[in-house]
Amino acid sequence: MRTLEARNGAKSPLGTIGTRVAIREAVKPVLALIFLAASLIGCAHTPANTSAAMAQWSHEQGGEINDCRVDRLRAVGATWSERTNIPLRFHVLNTTKVVAYSWPTGDVYCSAGLLNVATDVELKAAIAHELGHMLTDAKPGSPQAFGGNGSLTAEENADCCALALMKGANIPMDSLVTLLTKVSQASHSEQLRAGIQARIRLIRQAQ
Ligand SMILES: [Zn+2]
């Protein structure tokens, strides 16, 4: 499972030299990858064992809220379903944690805490990052997270994919930075905050 925050343990394949060039060059093939891989995501039928795992997992996260916040998330996320042709499904988790997750099934979970602090543009950035996980390192039967409970490399790859999507939709790339800053400020994990700062440095270099 991965989250929006990132751990600081893994070394980035981009390295520290020539990172700006590496990210800019990486964005180009990522766009082609997005539309190639999009057809493989969001199948109409989610395996029963995956549905059961998702239900158990969301229960463990505090359960789901079904009110106008889901409508807001759907409205904001519709941009990405339309642009990628991936049929995303949106859920709101009943927790004050500032976090978002996604499953390779096309299910995106944002916390009530995230919805409280994020602007609509920042939510689009969060969903773009989750799409990045689906397209670059999705593992069947497990969720990914915006903050990053996986490797820093996986988070940077998802960010790179998100930046490509955002660029194509004329969404300011800085919205990913401002959202990550809010996630970092809400976290008590030094390791997670350090990982986020590393990602923000890379995103700023790509701008
Ligand atoms: Zn992530």
Image: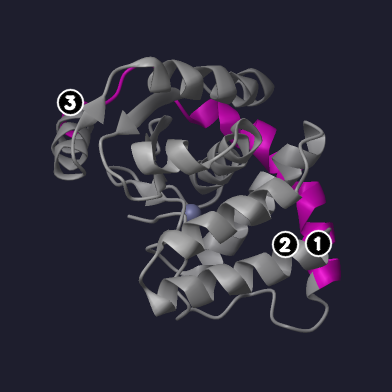
Query: Can you see residue 5?
Result: no
Q: Amino acid at mark 1?
A: Ala
| Residue 82 x, y percent position in the rendering | 64, 17
| Residue 81 x, y percent position in the rendering | 58, 21
Q: Secondary structure at mark 2?
A: helix
Q: Quadrant of residue 118?
A: top right
Quarter of the image with the N terminus in it: bottom left
Q: Amino acid at mark 3?
A: Ala
Query: Can you see residue 145?
Result: yes
Q: Is residue 101 above or below residue 178?
A: above
Q: Which numbered disc, 3 or 2, marks the residue closer to the eye?
A: 2
Could you classify mark 3 by the number of other residues whose Cα lies within 10 Å: few (under 14), some (14-19), or many (20 or more)? few
Q: Which residue position holds label 1?
A: 206
Q: Secondary structure at mark 3?
A: helix
Is 29 situated left or right of 59 in this image?
Answer: right
Q: Which residue position holds label 3?
A: 48
| Residue 33 shown in magenta | yes
Q: Are marks 1 and 3 in contact (CB under 8 Å)?
A: no
Q: Is mark 1 within 8 Å of ligand 1?
A: no
Is 185 situated left or right of 104 in this image?
Answer: right
| Residue 104 x, y percent position in the rendering | 40, 38
103, 194: nearer the viewer = 194
The part of the chain drawn in magenta is 20-49
Quarter of the image with the C terminus in it: bottom right
Q: Amino acid at mark 2?
A: Ile
Task: Give the CA distance from mark 2 to mark 1.
Answer: 5 Å
Q: Is residue 177 above or below residue 67?
A: below
Is 198 situated left or right of 204 in this image?
Answer: left
Task: Give the CA distance from mark 3 to mark 2.
Answer: 38 Å
Q: Are marks 2 and 1 in contact (CB under 8 Å)?
A: yes
Q: Which mark is residue 203?
A: 2
| Residue 55 x, y percent position in the rendering | 17, 32
